[in-house]
Amino acid sequence: QGAKPGEGGQLPGHKVNGLIARLRHTQPGVQLISPPPHHDIYSIEDLAQLIHDLKEINPRAKVTVKLVAESGVGTIAAGVAKADADVILVSGHDGGTGASPLSSIKHAGLPWELGVSETQQTLVLNNLRNRVTLRTDGGMRTGRDIVIAAMLGAEEYNFGTIAMIAMGCVYVRKCHLNTCPVGIATTSPKYRAKFKGTPEMVIQFFDSVAQEAREIMASIGVRRMADLIGYTSYLRQREVPDHNKANTIDLSTVLKDVAPEVAERSGIPLRDIARTRQLERNDGMHKPALDLRIIQDIANRTASGSGTTDALSESSDAQHVEETFRRLMDQPPISLDYEVVNTDRNIGTRLSGRVAEIYGNSGLPDGTINLEFRGSAGQSFGCFLCSGLRLELIGEGNDYVGKGMSGGEVIIRPPDTIAPEFEAASNSIVGNTVLYGATAGTLLVNGCAGERFCVRNSGATAVVEGVGDHGCEYMTNGLTVILGLTGKNFGAGMSGGTAYVYDIDGLFQSRINPEMIIALPVKRSEDIAEAKGLIEEHHRQTGSPRARLLLDDWEAALRKLIRVIPKERAELERQESQHENATEPVALK
């Protein structure tokens, strides 16, 4: 974060080299702008869903949620604990990026001491402290900082800036310029060659920090960290000589130990009141994932040709599941179908995680596993989907369809039995935040999507028949076809990829965000072929009447089709065209 200007969400194009472009699924030299807020989180329920998503793709993962130390952070932390986070990080105002505005560096957030104290007290008062690990950071430097943080309730301690200083950072605040004189915060080979740091430097520093912490503990008669964490009785407010203002501050609220109050109220012995984490995991209680049944069905089908099972336990015959999954590439394609309801969340996520564990990022060959679902799927249908999986939903989706998908196919269409007068292209069939952060794969939707469609799409292909506000926001790669109305602010922060929009009412130009994109008519033969091919595939897979209507009168449809691309790319295409059409060579800029 310290290598980015602004509030830590922009990576200048000159820092996006080949490696970073490959990791970010974009082109070298293209500026990357990340959403300042998390556009999939607008409530504590959304955060709980994100945590659930992450634990479905990797059931062994522990999830950390970072909060800013501020007034009221304890209430937020209680919600985070109930949302099944495993670690809560309370971040103080003192750390942060080396390239942020000075106003943010100086005035954003509160000291970590206030945040940790409030969080610890709130979690203890609400009997939530045993579920989570409390961590803190923000300008931590010494063993004394660790001891004070522990007394206030923190179990883990992050060091950022001071670790860089230990390896040679000289604090010139050029992190965002790619010219770090000691080669730490730079991607330039010229400056990286100047890096003189070694692992031993950092190890020696942290050994010294630990030694200082141990000496302080010994001086107050404490042998173990467990006897220190959460015991604020070891702290007292000191007098500051000749400083009347400092001596008027009352820290009694910060130094309060609420455990005796909880013990008295609940009748639980004081020694049994949790001041630290007690549970190994904070997974909460959820309906067993449909994916557990799907995984068992696939394993059984692969092993014996039988396609059903009553076993729903994640751990049941795990070795059998792994052995059969390793033989999937040698088997004919598998097809299964299921009825779903809206409490069946994250369909395909756990399955994708198992495939990725065995086959890595490449996944399986296309069409290896074909799953058909009927009904109303819960949130995160096809979330983190990988290559080789094809999910067809005959019914409707919810929020986060195809979120983070890295391959595979998702097809969503209304049932064939729906009333003849029903017009799919005018009705929402999936919710908000569809294809958020996707890097590959295909989504075909016979109907409309909600807001934040294709936010941060980095390589997926999608065809949909209408979207809400903020479509294709922060998109860096990929291809989108929208066969209907869009909402406002379309393409804000879009630095890559292509969107084809059927301007059904002639007002699309008024709904784009023109800062980084330009809307052009579709004239190049390769663009016409690309758009038409996707619409044809959409009709073949979903039977979309809107797609059929456009294909039947393609010349008329083409006149209303608009191609949206970043301005930088449009200028490059213009120069290339000028160069190709010139009677003598024209230098490209």
Image: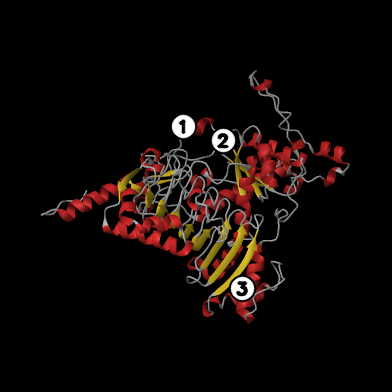
Structural crowding at the residue carrying mark 1, measured as other residues with C-alpha within 10 Å and reported as few (<14), some (14–19) or many (≥20): few
Q: CA distance from mark 1 to mark 3?
A: 56 Å
Vertical arrangement, residue 530 with respect to residue 124, above or below = below
Residue in view at x 83 percent, y 36 percent: 261
Let me know if residue 63 appears in the view. no
**Circle 3 is placed at which residue position?**
298
Q: Label 1 is placed on what type of residue? A: Leu
Q: Residue furthest right?
A: 267
Residue 79: % across, % down? 68, 42
CB-based contact (under 8 Å), mark 1 and mark 2: no
Structural crowding at the residue carrying mark 2, measured as other residues with C-alpha within 10 Å and reported as few (<14), some (14–19) or many (≥20): many
Q: Quadrant of residue 170?
A: top left
Residue 93 image label: 2
Q: CA distance from mark 1 to mark 2?
A: 12 Å
Residue 102 image label: 1
Point out the frontmost of discs 3 and 2.
Answer: 3
